[in-house]
Each structure stands twice: as structure tokens, then as C-alpha cells.
Image: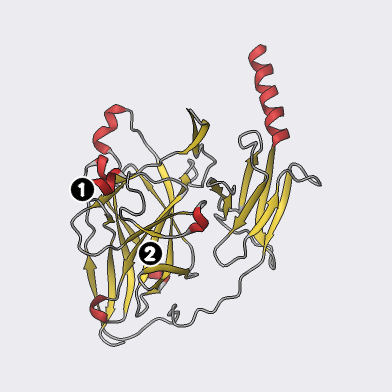
Amino acid sequence: MKRYLSVIFFFITYCTTAQEFKIVDGKDRSPISFATISFGDGLGTFADEEGSFTFSSKKYPDIDTLFISGLGYKEKALLIPLEDNPTATIVKLDPEVSQLGEVIVSAPKEGKFKFRKQKAQTHNDIFACWLPTVESEIAVLFTRYENKASQISKLYLPVNAESEYKFKGKGKFATIFRAQFYENNKGTPGSAIPYESVIFAMDEKADKVFELDLLSKSIFIPESGIFISIQVLGYAGLDGKLIETKKYREIKTSRGIQKISTSFRPLLPFIKGEANQRTFVRRIFFNDKKWQVFDQNYNPNSKLLQTGHRNYGMGAEFKVFESN
């Protein structure tokens, strides 16, 4: 009986401290899938496919404002708690007006073409891998193949699912990722290119190199090049949809309890020895989302950088046309 009372008490407490949100387009009220919710202190989370998420003031008692954004929408600040409706609310985001210029080639090209590959570079050293967290995004620069009109038909994503360590308790998993696209702004990721969202999942079977088919997305590389990023959203449930999982763990330190980002599988192998620096990273809930080249200036204490592993060896298949 005591156990049941404890469960009931927890449920009542959670319901009185949790708020449900639904993020929708301000014009047509359609849900904004996987919108970004920043807590304003370097932490954050994502809405699910239906634009829904739950915020618990019990888990984050020091948060009084949420910053909600989505690709192609203006960011909105939301005060917490909501006095007029403490349990549920609809959040409307206004679309941003942007000029796409020459960045997107929407009409399919015709004529002769060949498929060409840029191989992914990988390894199986788990100690030379990036640990994916919900706060980090990794972008890699791609240029046109031999300076000809090039469409990205596939991405080759190096992964390490730690299959060799299953005997240590590493079991099944399914992690949802998002691929995004950015202009090349003088060698740095610039404005986001609003292609259709590319959401995909990887599980423990996706070891070494994961192939992501993008042929139907009609993603063409501009003359200046394109940055392609991947970002972890969280674990998937049995139905394949994003579930609310613990994205931060609490660690006791001399400065008090600190929330540390939880890492997700699979790991992302970084390589060394490449002459050109193609990899940029950013913390999307921190430092105004600024991109930084992954070198010693990013974090001199990084074990990856100390051992020379500076690049994520993402590869691609190109559909290359003979004429521009």
C-alpha cells in the first residue's frame, strides 16, 4: 500500500509541476516537428514529431523562460510558469521571410550524369570518437565534384555502435538524428538552407558506415559549397518516434550540482591527418549558437584534439551532371 501511495503522490506532484506544450505554425496551425527548446542556460531539448513536449519545473526549478525556435521560424520567448494555463498551451511561431537566391536548385536537372563517391573515413577506436549529445551539432563542408553541377544522392556517416563491447552490457538502441544544410559563408557554416527536414534513425546494427539516401530530396551543391550537419535528437521508442529521455545527468561538484549532457549511441569516429579543416561544431543551446572550427581554439582540453582527431570523415555520393 505504501508503494502505491508513493506512486500516486509522485504522479500528482509531477502533474502539478509539468507543463505540456504544442508548437504550431502561426498561420496554418500545422505542428512544427522537432522544434528546438532552449532553457537559456546552455541546456535544452526538442519537441517530438507532432511538435509536442513537456517541461517539468521540478526537474529545472531555476528556469523561468523557454526560447522556442524552428527552421524557417522566428524565435519566441515563453515565461515559465504560465499563470493563465499551468498545464497545457499552444505555442505559435511566425514564419521568417528569407531570400533563398541561388542557394536552392528546386527544379530537377536533365541530361547526362554519373554517380561519383567520396568515401567516408572511419576507424573502430572508441576513445577517438565524438560523443553525440542533444546540445551539439557537427557540420562538414562539401564542394561540387570536379566543379560540375552536383547533387547529393547519399551521405556516408561513419559510426561506432560499440558492437565489440556488447558483452559489457551494450544492448539494443535506436537514436533519432537530424541532417541540416547551411550556406558556405567564407569557409564557415552560414545561414540555414530550408530544405525539407531529413530525420532518420540509427541502431546498434549501423556499425562502421551508415548510408543515408538523399536522392529524392533534390539537394544541389551551390558554387560556393554546402555544409551538411548531423545532430542527435534523442532515443526512439518501439514505435520509432522520439521519446522523452533523460538528456542530462546531475553530478555533485564543489560548485554544487551540475547538469551534464547525456551522450547517445552510436559514437561518431573522428579522424586525423587530413590537410584541410572541414569540420565545424557548435552547442545549439549555448554561445548564441555560434559555429567554431574544431581545432585547439575550440577546446584545448579535448582528448580528440590532443590526439590530432580533428575531422569527422563524412562521405557522400554525388550525382554529377556533365554540364552546368
**Earlier along the polypeptide chain: callout 2 or callout 1?**
1
Answer with left or right where residue 203 lies relative to residue 269: right
Task: Inspect the image, locate mark 1, and give the three-letter code of the amino acid beneath it.
Answer: His
Residue 103 figure quarter: bottom left
Residue farthest to the right, as pictured: 84
Find residue 28 and report its horizontal and vertical position in percent.
68, 67
Q: Vertically, is 35 above or below 214?
A: above
Q: Nearer the viewer, residue 70 or 316?
A: 70
Q: Which of 80 and 173 is in front in this view?
A: 80
User: Neighbour class for label 1 at 10 Å: few (<14), some, many (≥20)?
Assistant: some
Q: Which of 305 and 109 is in front in this view?
A: 305
Q: Which mark is residue 134?
A: none
Answer with left or right where residue 28 lies relative to residue 138: right
At horizontal 45% and vertical 79% (from top left) the residue drawn is: 106
Q: Residue 228 carries which label?
A: 2
Q: Which mark is residue 123?
A: 1
Count of residue discs? 2
Find residue 262 and report its horizontal and vertical position in percent.
44, 38
At horizontal 51% and vertical 34% (from top left) the residue drawn is: 258
